Image (cartoon, rainbow, N blue to C red):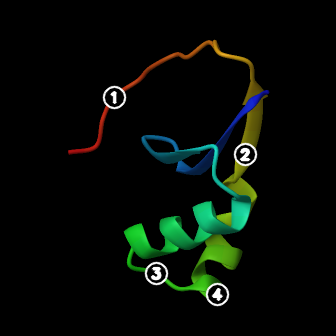
Amino acid sequence: MKNKLIIIGIKGNYRCYLNIPREEAIRRYIYSEDSNEEDFLINYLHTLKEIEFDDVFGAYSIFTLD
């Protein structure tokens, strides 16, 4: 079974959602940014990326949001 990572945001401020439906990731992103669906569709939908991987993937930088 492949893992699915959904990445939303702009450089330096990505949020990543692992193994959840696309619609749930969008809902959570909108909530986390204290935004609304219209703003998301205009400003962030084009930033959404989905990757599938087995159990390893490469990364340039990893950090946590505290």
Element on which disc 1 rests: loop
Relative to 23, residue 54 above or below: above
The amino acid type of the residue labelled 4 equals Glu
At 39% across and 68% down in the image, what residue appears?
A: 32
Dot 1 alpha-carbon crowd within 10 angstroms: few under 14, some 14 to 19, many 20 or more: few
Q: Which residue is mark 4?
A: 38
Could you tell me which secondary element the residue under label 4 belongs to?
helix
Residue 33, percent from left and from top: 40, 70
Q: Which mark is residue 63?
A: 1
Residue 45 drawn at (x, y percent)? 71, 65
Structural distance between the alpha carbons of marks 2 and 4: 19 Å
Label 4 near label 2: C-beta < 8 Å?
A: no
As drawn, the residue found furthest toward the left would be 66
Q: Which residue is mark 3?
A: 35
The alpha-carbon separation of the residues under discs 1 and 4 comes to 29 Å
The crowd level at tag 4 (other Cα within 10 Å; few <14, some 14-19, many 20+) is few
Q: Name which residue type carries label 2.
A: Lys
Earlier-in-chain disc, 3 versus 2: 3
Residue matched to label 2: 49
